[in-house]
Image (spheres, rainbow, N blue to C red):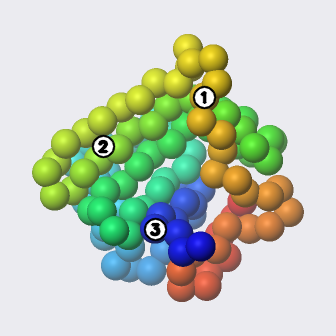
Amino acid sequence: MLSFTTSIPSLGVLMLPPLLRVYEGCARGYIGVVEGANVVRLHRRVPQISYLAYPHFDHDPHPALMGSLVVHLQTLQVRYMDYRTTDSPPSSIGRKRSSPLTIRYGKNLPA
């Protein structure tokens, strides 16, 4: 199944190809730095960037999502979802602890 998003650790943004760094930088320039976000999701079919907060991302291979902030780059709409009080927050991005995340260009990013 083809993925229409690429999720990377927020520190991995610096390792993206220049065009994708500009794409993410447009959202960050509009809203500023998102405190607590440790995963950035780049959408391919829709011009939007999601900033995701997984409090135990570094230690848990399937952490629960605590919050997401989505910036739509065409309409400049910003949407925040708080999952802290949800009985069953969305599951994690499905990464495995032993395998690094890979973006479309084949670069390995730190997990």
Tell me the residue at 36%/55% (across/down): 49
Measure the alpha-carbon separation of dots 2 and 3: 25 Å
Q: Secondary structure at mark 1?
A: loop
Give the amino acid at mark 3: Phe
- The residue to which callout 3 is attached is 4
- Give the class, few, some or many, for how many residues have Cα within 10 Å of label 1's Cα (few <14, many ≥20): some
Q: Is residue 33 above or below residue 4?
A: above
User: What amino acid is labelled 1 in the image?
Assistant: Pro
- Which residue is the site of mark 1? 89
Determine which residue is flagged by label 2: 32
- Indicate the position of residue 44 as horizontal and vertical percent values: 38, 70
| Camera-side mark, 1 or 2 | 1
User: Which residue is pictured at 61% across the width and 85% down the height?
Assistant: 106
Q: Amino acid at mark 2?
A: Gly
Residue at point 75%, 44% (across, down): 62
Would you say the residues marked 1 and 3 are in contact, meaning their CB atoms lie under 8 Å apart?
A: no
Q: Nearer the viewer, residue 81 or 53?
A: 81
Question: How far apart are the two marked residues, 1 and 2, measured between alpha carbons?
Answer: 25 Å
